[in-house]
């Protein structure tokens, strides 16, 4: 967006997360992930000048609301509840939730087995909302998903519910055979860029998303991060 008069382009502040692999994370100070790559490509197509602002998930929603950042790209699920306060871009990723439990747990085989169980999840996430509806489950929620995974590894909870791809990454990377995924993915979700209601950037972002889908950039990035 060219600011009138001076010919200078305004810098859009885009919130990302520090610890949501493989979508957006920081490693030795570098910002990485599928969403970081994707955002870069979208911004290039849409001619958006931007600055990435890494923060914790809990801060992201607040920062979009307060205007501290203009947009966020960080595994944000399009949810009807949030639609009252936020505006979403076209979705760019399909996913859902999964149940994790200890490798030696023979009782929990799917989300149907969580009644009366202690279930860990992340504050304010779609998984948290889902968990709250399980009859009789005892929910423990944390502001950092690393704590959710630690509880699982330490066997201090029976199960956890969280976003499928992030859980998958944890299993491969850090679970060391101690944790497994059980049952099918459920609660189909889609990630999109989020901004405040009536913000002036979403239209451009959508054009960028369309362009990277059409020219194969999206597919190349998808394969890079998630395999064929
Ligand atoms: N997709 C879920 C949600 O929108 C979890 C988001 C987690 N994102 C993150 N950056 N940690 O509630």
Image (tube, helix red, strand yellow):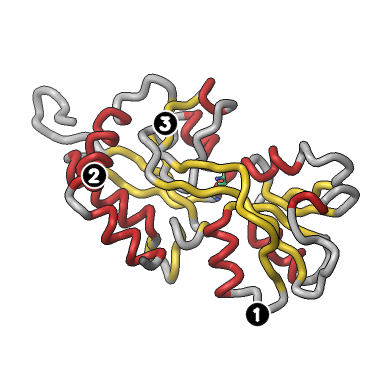
Determine the secondary structure under disc 3. strand
Instruction: Kindly report which numbered mark, 2 or 3, lies closer to the viewer in this rendering.
Output: 3
Badge 3 or badge 1: first in the primary sequence: 3
**Alpha-carbon span between mark 2 and mark 3:** 16 Å
Q: Nearer the viewer, residue 6 or 64?
A: 64
The disc label shown at residue 176, or none: 1
Instruction: Kindly report which numbered mark, 1 or 2, lies closer to the viewer in this rendering.
Output: 1
The disc label shown at residue 77, or none: none
Q: Which quarter of the rendered picture does the C terminus lie within?
A: bottom left
The disc label shown at residue 88, or none: 3
Q: Residue furthest bottom?
A: 176
Determine the secondary structure under disc 2. helix
Q: Is residue 122 above or below residue 203?
A: below
Q: Nearer the viewer, residue 55 or 161?
A: 161
The answer to whether marks 1 and 2 mark residues whose Cβ atoms lie closer than 8 Å is no
Residue 169 percent across, percent down from the top left: 54, 67
């Amino acid at each position: 967006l060219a600011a009138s008069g001076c010919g200078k382009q305004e810098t859009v502040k885009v919130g990302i997360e520090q610890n949501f692999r493989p979508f957006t994370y920081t490693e030795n100070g570098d910002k990485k992930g599928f969403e970081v790559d994707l955002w870069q490509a979208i911004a290039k197509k849409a001619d958006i000048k931007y600055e990435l602002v890494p923060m914790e998930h809990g801060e992201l929603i607040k920062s979009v609301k307060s205007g501290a950042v203009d947009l966020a790209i960080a595994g944000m699920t399009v949810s009807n509840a949030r639609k009252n306060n936020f505006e979403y871009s076209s979705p760019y990723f399909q996913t859902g939730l999964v149940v994790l439990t200890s490798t030696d747990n023979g009782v929990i085989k799917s989300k149907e087995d969580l009644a009366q169980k202690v279930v860990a999840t992340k504050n304010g996430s779609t998984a948290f909302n889902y968990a709250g509806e399980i009859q009789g489950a005892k929910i423990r929620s944390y502001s950092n998903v690393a704590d959710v995974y630690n509880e699982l590894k330490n066997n201090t909870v029976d199960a956890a519910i969280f976003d499928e791809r992030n859980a998958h990454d944890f299993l491969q990377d850090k679970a060391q055979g101690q944790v497994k995924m059980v049952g099918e993915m459920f609660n189909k979700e889609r990630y999109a860029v989020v901004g405040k209601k009536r913000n002036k950037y979403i239209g451009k972002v959508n054009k960028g998303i369309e362009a990277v889908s059409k020219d194969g950039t999206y597919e190349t990035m998808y394969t890079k991060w998630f395999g064929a």
